[in-house]
Amino acid sequence: MNIVILAAGLGKRMKSDLPKVLHQIAGRPLLGHVLGAAHSLKPNKLVVVYGHGAEKVLAALQAPDGGLPATGGAPAIDWVLQSPQLGTGHAVAQAVPHLDEAHPTLVLYGDVPLVSPSTLQRLREATDGGSAVALLTQVMPDPTGLGRIVRKDGKVARIVEHKDADAETLRIREINTGILIAPTSPLKSWLVALRNDNAQGEYYLTDIIAAAVRDGIIVNTVHPAALWETLGVNSKTQLAELERQHQRNLAFSLTESGVTLADPARIDIRGSLQCGRDVSIDVGCIFEGTVTLGDRVRIAANCVIRDAEIGDDVEVLAMSHIEQAKVGTRSRVGPFARLRPGTELGEDNHVGNFVEFKNAKMASGSKANHLAYVGDAKIGARVNIGAGTITCNYDGANKHQTVIEDDVFIGSDSQLVAPVTVRRGATLGAGTTLTREAPPDALTVSRARQVTVAGWTRPVKKK
Ligand code: UD1
Ligand code: CA
């Protein structure tokens, strides 16, 4: 099959400098969603008709999960500029030189992001092996503005655009979604014959239906499984509505797979979220990129988790922020913890409130329960990092490594001036500023000795 995605429209009503198809749903451009659906049909040819901001469109789609396939398998996209934009028929005509006549052609819209592969598969089956035209239509309570499906004796006769319709035609509630499949060779001849003597002075793709009927080609219709599948985005309001619809779909697919959601209306997934068994997620959480949660993971309210692997039985407490990090089995993170890129927590770790980790690994059974910054560090097993501990990893020019071996106890309010190593079993006294290696199994402390001045009296206010 050939697939042509129409994406040249300006999208004036978006009131934005960004090309319409680059506005995002679930963190991915609208066009990326359509490309995803297109790829799932394994097309022989894939053509995108674009109009505005070609460089911006290409750059955005090349970003991770922008929509372009990272690896082979999918066909290269042929980008075709349509300028000026003279209508949907004119747009498809620009793609014609790229189409393979041996296969039928599917037309999708770059601003209709939620059409499902299964609906498109049913549409494909309605082409009677590629010879018929298959039209995706829908019965709408309010068809205002849309093309009407005119039938004769039950069979599709033609499509009439709202602006060209007479009073009787306007009463028809079956509308053209715009998505269709047509046999490519006759499609080419129908496109060449299009005229623009209509209310909008445009070359309507929809006029090919009457041409097909005239040529004795059967026109079959299919309805999408759900109404939202063929809704387009023309304004920020519609964008927000489709975002909610999409999030609702994602949330219910999670609950169907056994995940407990405190409120399916209060979770946002912008990427892929894989969950094990008996996972529960409280309200207000955002998952971005690729996130995996192991079995029995509990995520409390208002956490943001991006590109992370969370092991079995982990508990993430409220208001935690986790990015490009791994959390080992049975660990507890938060509340108010921040795990930055390169963090790898082992099993049974505790990382508590106001603790920040960055590019740091911690082995099993270690804890940093309160108020600490741990950056560029390698921490062994069963280590206790006291409140207020800071790895001074940055000298203003370069980053340096802190190594803390197994069974170390770091007293509260210590600064470890990297590069520095704390040997196995060492204890740092509270308030230590460590600038040289701390030897194993010994107490190292760097603070002025405590003195008591006998006979000292507090100053008193002068009268
Ligand atoms: C079109 C259909 C109408 C259908 C409606 C569904 C035509 C003539 N009419 O309406 O029957 O009910 O979609 O939404 O086809 N585009 C281009 N180049 C152009 C014009 C449009 O690439 O020159 C793209 C737009 O970016 C958009 C899609 O085609 O993705 C549809 O265009 P739009 O103007 O929204 O549709 P209508 O013509 O109003
Ligand atoms: Ca439209």
Image (cartoon, rainbow, N blue to C red):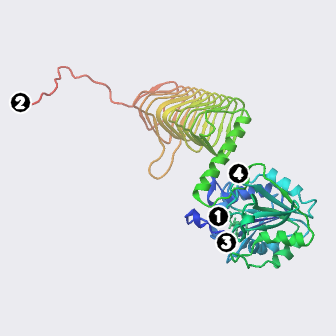
Residue at image mark 3: 51
Q: Is mark 4 within 8 Å of ligand 1?
A: no
Q: Is tag 4's residue or tag 1's residue first in the polypeptide sequence?
A: 1
Q: Is tag 4's residue or tag 2's residue first in the polypeptide sequence?
A: 4
What amino acid is found at the position of numbered circle 2 in the picture?
Lys
The disc label shown at residue 228, or none: 4
Q: Is mark 1 within 8 Å of ligand 1?
A: no
What amino acid is found at the position of numbered circle 1 in the picture?
Ala
The disc label shown at residue 59, or none: 1
Query: Where does the image place residue 280, in percent across and percent down from the top left?
Result: 64, 31
Alpha carbons under labels 4 and 2: distance apart: 81 Å
Task: Answer whether residue 411 is visible to the viewer in this image.
Answer: yes
Q: Secondary structure at mark 2?
A: loop
Query: Where does the image place residue 304, in percent across and percent down from the top left?
Result: 57, 41
Q: Secondary structure at mark 4?
A: helix
Alpha carbons under labels 4 and 3: distance apart: 26 Å
Quadrant hosting residue 261: top right
What amino acid is found at the position of numbered circle 3 in the picture?
Gly
Is disc 2 surrounded by few (<14), some (14 to 19) or many (20+) residues within 10 Å? few
Q: Residue at x 16, y 23 (%)?
A: 457
Alpha carbons under labels 4 and 1: distance apart: 28 Å
Alpha carbons under labels 2 and 1: distance apart: 75 Å
Work out whether residue 67 or residue 34 is closer to the camera in this orientation and state it: 34
Q: Is tag 4's residue or tag 3's residue first in the polypeptide sequence?
A: 3
The disc label shown at residue 463, or none: 2
Q: Residue at x 82, y 79 (%)?
A: 193
Alpha carbons under labels 2 and 3: distance apart: 84 Å
Outermost residue to the left: 463
Can you tell me which quadrant of the image ligand 1 is in?
bottom right
